[in-house]
Image (cartoon, coloured by chain):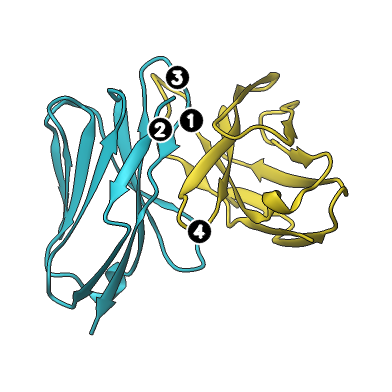
Chain colours: A yellow, B cyan
Amino acid sequence: NAGVTQTPKFQVLKTGQSMTLQCAQDMNHEYMSWYRQDPGMGLRLIHYSVGAGITDQGEVPNGYNVSRSTTEDFPLRLLSAAPSQTSVYFCASSYRDRGIGELFFGEGSRLTVL
Amino acid sequence: GQQVMQIPQYQHVQEGEDFTTYCNSSTTLSNIQWYKQRPGGHPVFLIQLVKSGEVKKQKRLTFQFGEAKKNSSLHITATQTTDVGTYFCAGRTSGTYKYIFGTGTRLKVLA
């Protein structure tokens, strides 16, 4: 099993460009989420999904869109990148049974916006 | 909204010394999880605590969940160089599917 796979691992964008960070999991997890990690601020939840067709906002959703058309995939879209979105992005998934279990993280995507 | 604070932000210890990080939530939690992130890596799950006053041990690591379910701690006995990394707590409130992470404690172990 590959677990949680994120692509790309590194990306440089110019302000105003758009892009999609991909996240796929092969564990049949219902729950998937996106976090961003900035120095001194821990991991902040951007968006999450509890199943195909269902998404909701986390702590810092502005500037990001998500969709969940399949159980396996949960892409994160930046419509118009800003320097403040320079960060390391982690996708995480879990089973959903009487709550949420342990989060399995991808290896991260490092995004720089110039 | 829900906030989770962790202290200290940094901790340097000599190998063999003990280490403790504390996690405090602004709201009562349904459960709390702990993660370790090695430098350059991704967070890896350590443990989950659910019950009020719960204490769990994993070898040299001891995890506690407060009686009011608003705070937690991770204690490492006799640190080793392999313990280096950042330790995060993540709390979830009842009825939500959001895990809110603490700011993390970065541990350095000096040999």
Query: Residue B25 or A52: which is nearer the viewer?
Result: B25
Look at mark 4 in the image and give the residue it sits on.
A39
Look at mark 1 in the image and give the residue it sits on.
A95
Q: Are marks 1 and 2 in contact (CB under 8 Å)?
A: yes
Q: How crowded is mark 4: few (under 14 residues within 10 Å), some or many (20 or more)?
A: few
Query: How far apart are the two marked residues, 1 and 2, measured between alpha carbons?
Result: 6 Å
Query: How far apart are the two marked residues, 2 and 3, measured between alpha carbons?
Result: 13 Å
Helix, strand or loop under label 4: loop
Q: How crowded is mark 3: few (under 14 residues within 10 Å), some or many (20 or more)?
A: few
Look at mark 3 in the image and give the residue it sits on.
B96
Q: Which circle, 1 or 4, is nearer the viewer?
A: 4
Query: How far apart are the two marked residues, 1 and 4, measured between alpha carbons?
Result: 29 Å
Q: Going 26% across and 56% down the picture, which residue do you hit? A: B8
> Along the horizontal axis of the image, is B106 left or right of A80?
left
Quick one: label 1 or label 2, which is nearer the N terminus?
1
Q: Residue B59: tell me if it is visible.
A: no
Helix, strand or loop under label 2: loop
Across and down, in percent, residue A25 comes to 62, 42
Is the residue at mark 2 from the same chain as the one at mark 3? no
Query: Residue A112 or B95: which is nearer the viewer?
Result: A112
Q: Tell me where residue A34 sits by quadrant.
A: top right
Query: Which chain contains the residue that carries disc 3?
Result: B
Q: Tell me where residue A47 sits by quadrant.
A: top right
Look at mark 2 in the image and give the residue it sits on.
A101
